[in-house]
């Protein structure tokens, strides 16, 4: 059943080079699989068949001219899809919100353009929590995405469509965005390799912003190498994004070095955190043992202010979201409620009816936190906490090269199982501090939970701009666990 869907980047490129198949055949097979399987998963909001076939034909022409796949680009001939907060010219970019239901992108985000220039075959746009506000993809205005491992469970969020597409073989690699865990948590829930690079490694130009100081784009894949190759394709300085940095790292360079000689940090407080399920804790502890067996040194490190990360994040995040979403005024673009005679009532009705409940909740919270008399009480202290957390990580990396931690306190939950917003926010309790500090982090599939028999990821966290450390440790663990399989129902 799987065919091309089970292949990784290297397998596709070897087949293209040896003329076992063409890029058009790869694209057609991917499009056919989406048509056949996505009704069950609902990962895609828009399929870009014409763009995919055009890109595939260009790759075939380049191959026919004598170029190798490697000369075309690091992901030449590889089916890829994009979270629907990433602009791609001529496609809808809705952020899974009624507010942008009719919006058509007039330009392409840098990360998307680079992925296509690197030979990626663009399959379409992927479902997400509305404006990236959520941890389950249940807040999408266009229907929830299902976890391919259990269609009655969530795929995580907010990049749930990106994770589910890879887990079901509906794309070889995908791009998502991560503001507080929105790549890593769905990666853990769906058994995929999911990478949030250091802030600044990938341009944010053309990404609809949630929290501008927190957002970062990264890849989903079924192997560490595929994720590294995809990150090679999209990383680097972009003059259109003043926060992007001149990164020229080859993230595949040290994948074969193994863990011997690495110092792996272990945070005891994370392992004793309230709400951490025993089956998740056991898998993280087992991963630590595997790294030690591979020659790594386990080192206890302290992150004393990490416990305040959740509180700081839910001040900083809503404040930045309030600012970023103020541009959706129903005048320049976006949903416009009909029948109003004055601008004030039009604004009010358009924003009330265009945004969903979670988006409205965060807008109102951000508005309150930035109001006179409240700003000094909450926003300034949150920024101070951010400085403390960043300093904690800096001190920790004086003792270690990478930190091992849980991704999520539990495995994927059933739809509707968590209805309380505060409980939902706790899904990101182990991931938020990394966004606060700007470090890189990734989720690596480490097996199935003993009780739920659902995927569990372990989190590897690297120092700023040393993301190659976490890739190296992840590759060493992948030697034990193997590459991530397709979800059984889609294999």
Image: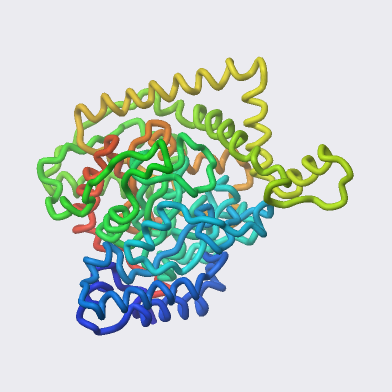
The image shows residue 151, relative to residue 445, as above or below, that is below
Q: Residue at x 28, y 54 (%)?
A: 232
Residue 374 at x, y percent in the picture: 64, 18
Q: Would residue 115 be seen by someone viewing this image from the given angle? A: yes
Picture coordinates of residue 377 (x, y %)? 58, 16
| Quadrant of the rendered image containing residue 325 | top right
**Considering depth in this image, is 105 or 290 the residue closer to the camera?**
105
> How far across and down, in percent of the image, does residue 458 sit?
33, 48
Q: Tell me if I can see residue 156 in this picture.
A: no
Q: Residue at x 26, y 28 (%)?
A: 396
Q: Where the C terminus falls, by quadrant?
A: bottom left
How many numbered marks have been drawn onto this rendered protein structure? 0
Question: Measured from the top left, where is residue 480 in percent x and y?
Answer: 20, 58
**Residue 27 image-quadrant placement:** bottom left
Q: Say which quarter of the image contains residue 488.
A: bottom left
Left or right of 143? Residue 252 is left
Residue 404 horizontal side relative to residue 338, left or right: left
Which residue is at the front of the view, 403 or 63?
63
- Quadrant, the N terminus: bottom left
Seen in the picture, residue 46 relative to 449 is either above or below; the reply is below
């Amino acid at each position: 059943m799987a065919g091309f869907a089970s292949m990784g980047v290297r397998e596709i490129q070897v087949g293209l080079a040896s003329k076992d198949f063409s890029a058009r055949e790869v694209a057609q097979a991917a499009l056919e699989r989406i048509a056949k399987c996505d009704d069950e998963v609902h990962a895609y909001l828009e399929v870009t068949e014409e763009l995919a076939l055009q890109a595939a034909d260009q790759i075939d022409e380049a191959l026919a001219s004598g170029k190798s796949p490697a000369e075309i680009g690091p992901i030449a001939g590889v089916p890829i899809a994009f979270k629907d907060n990433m602009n791609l010219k001529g496609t809808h970019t809705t952020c899974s919100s009624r507010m942008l239901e009719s919006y058509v992108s007039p330009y392409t985000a840098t990360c998307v353009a680079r992925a296509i220039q690197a030979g990626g075959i663009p399959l379409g746009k992927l479902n997400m929590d509305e404006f990236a506000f959520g941890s389950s993809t249940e807040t999408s205005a266009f229907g929830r995405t299902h976890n391919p491992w259990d269609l009655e469970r969530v795929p995580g969020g907010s990049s749930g469509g990106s994770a589910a597409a890879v887990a079901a073989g509906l794309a070889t690699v995908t791009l998502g965005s991560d503001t507080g865990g929105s790549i890593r948590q769905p990666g853990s829930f769906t058994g995929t390799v999911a990478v949030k690079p250091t802030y600044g490694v990938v341009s944010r130009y053309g990404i609809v912003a949630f929290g501008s100081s927190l957002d970062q784009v990264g890849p989903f894949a079924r192997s560490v190498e595929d994720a590294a190759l995809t990150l090679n394709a999209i990383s680097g300085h972009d003059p259109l994004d003043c926060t992007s940095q001149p990164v020229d790292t080859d993230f595949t360079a040290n994948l074969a070095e193994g863990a011997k000689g690495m110092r792996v940090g272990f945070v005891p407080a994370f392992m004793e955190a309230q709400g951490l399920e025993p089956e998740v804790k056991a898998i993280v502890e087992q991963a630590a043992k595997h790294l030690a067996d591979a020659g790594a040194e386990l080192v206890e490190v302290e992150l004393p202010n990490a416990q305040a990360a959740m509180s700081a994040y839910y001040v900083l995040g809503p404040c930045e979201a309030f600012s970023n979403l103020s541009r959706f005024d129903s005048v320049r673009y976006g949903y416009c409620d009909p029948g109003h005679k004055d601008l004030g009532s039009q604004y009010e009705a358009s924003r009330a009816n265009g945004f969903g409940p979670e988006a409205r909740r965060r807008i109102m919270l951000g508005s309150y936190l930035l109001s006179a008399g409240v700003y000094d009480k909450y926003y300034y202290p949150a920024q101070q906490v951010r400085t403390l957390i960043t300093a904690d990580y800096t001190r920790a990396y004086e003792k270690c090269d990478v930190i091992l931690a849980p991704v999520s306190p539990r495995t994927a939950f059933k739809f509707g199982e968590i209805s309380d917003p505060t409980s939902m926010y706790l899904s990101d309790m182990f991931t938020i501090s990394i966004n606060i500090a700007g470090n890189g982090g990734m989720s690596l599939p480490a097996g199935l939970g003993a009780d739920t028999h659902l995927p569990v990821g372990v989190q590897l966290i690297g120092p700023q701009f040393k993301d190659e450390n976490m890739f190296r440790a992840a590759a060493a663990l992948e030697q034990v666990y193997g590459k991530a399989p397709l979800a059984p129902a889609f294999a």
